[in-house]
Amino acid sequence: MLFQLLIIICISTNTYASNKLVTLPLSITSLFQATYFYRNTTVPFSFTNCTGVNDADNSDPAENKLLKSRNASFISYSTEFKSLIDSNTTPKLIEQQPVSIPFAHEGGAYVPETNEVWFSANQLPQQNTNVSSINLTTNEVTLLNINNPINTPNGIKYFNSLVYVCSQGTKTIPAAIYAVNPTTLVSKVIVNSWFGYRLNSPNDVTFSTKISGKTFMWFTDPQVAYQQGFAGVPEYQNTVFRYDMLTGELRPVITDLITPNGIAFNQEETVLYVSDTTPTSDIAIVYAYDLTKDGLPMNRRIFSVSSYGIPDGIKVDKYDRVWTAEGDGINVRNSYGTLLGVILGYNLSSNGLISNFELKDNTVIILAQEKLWRLDLAQNVL
């Protein structure tokens, strides 16, 4: 989705702490017992500076545990999150490429026909058409040879035997949403215009089937490609669109977000989650919307605010927990927005950034730029 450059100090990216879970009370997010504490805006919560805390103190206050979380794999704020982690829950590195090749950046879509998760590369430092897959049986990673290559691919979603890929386009090739047959790898354009205007740069996509008895495709369409210099001047505002899969109607349904990014529904499709993200104005919010009987978003409210970085990819598990890729890792919240725990990203990539991921049964495929990780949880979540 969005390209972020996060500066993380005092973090070693040459090593990786295997299975290490640090349990913290949620109250530490609002109250420190240390005589002095300070957090620089360029570091995650774990790197808050504290004085007046003895790391060897046998009482092991919450601040000491926070210090220890700098070398951990997980932070748990709840028994619910802790139940997902056991002694075998350790991120396993599947593939690594040079830092200059962020091949595992976006997407994260499970494809049942091939038992694969598809994902896309970052468009920076150069534009590309790279969509890859990891086979969940063999862990083999493959660069897919899609017929009719998709320029600057981004968000990906599987629906009804097809894989839908957001193309951000270029200065000469219009942005679009493509549908790809996962068996033949033949792609076709589904939508590329709103009344003759070119799309901005579709970022993420999802589907609903329970609203008004219709099937809708929903996607965020921010002006990110123009802002990053590889697309032309935008022809309309940042928008969230709803596309009727039967009639072909493309309708703007949200137009007041700064930079709409991730998008997902709860299991009953009664709540729509959309992240609003831009590094330049410090917006890092996931909004929740109810839906009218006609399938229009209403009652916008703040669901969560990221304490570090921006909320990029969003997934909702079978328990309606909301998982978001943020600056410190994958944050897991319950349906009320309470933070349950974090899969930490400090040591998973060179800059600590996880843009997206995918959930399948008990497996989390983590897209960490130049590294691809697999995490097998103690419980099925989807």
Image (cartoon, rainbow, N blue to C red):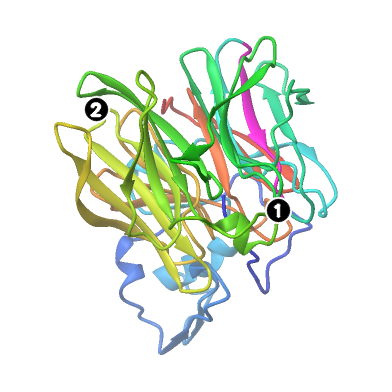
- Secondary structure of the residue carrying tag 1 is loop
- Which amino acid, mark 2? Glu
From the top left corner, tell me how far across and down residue 76 is, in percent.
42, 51
Image position of 173 with respect to 180: above or below = below
Image position of 247 with respect to 217: above or below = above
Residue extending farthest to the left is 293
- Residue at the location (41% across, 28% down)? 381
From the top left corner, tell me how far across and down residue 356 is, in percent.
56, 44
Question: What segment carries the magenta color?
Answer: 114-123
**Residue 156: which quarter of the image?**
top right
Foreground residue, 29 or 277?
277
- Secondary structure of the residue carrying tag 2 is loop
Q: Is residue 254 left or right of residue 353?
A: left
Q: Residues within 10 Å of mark 2 (few under 14, many from 20)?
A: few
Q: Which mark is residue 236?
A: none
- Residue at the location (49% across, 65% down)? 278
Foreground residue, 95 or 150?
150
The magenta stretch spans residue 120: yes
Foreground residue, 289 or 374?
289
Tell me if I can see residue 158 in this picture.
yes
Q: Are marks 2 and 1 in contact (CB under 8 Å)?
A: no
Of tags 2 and 1, the one toward the viewer is 2
Q: Which label's residue is closer to the chain start, 2 or 1? A: 2
Residue extending farthest to the right is 98
Q: Which residue is mark 2?
A: 268
Q: Residues within 10 Å of mark 1 (few under 14, many from 20)?
A: many
The magenta stretch spans residue 247: no
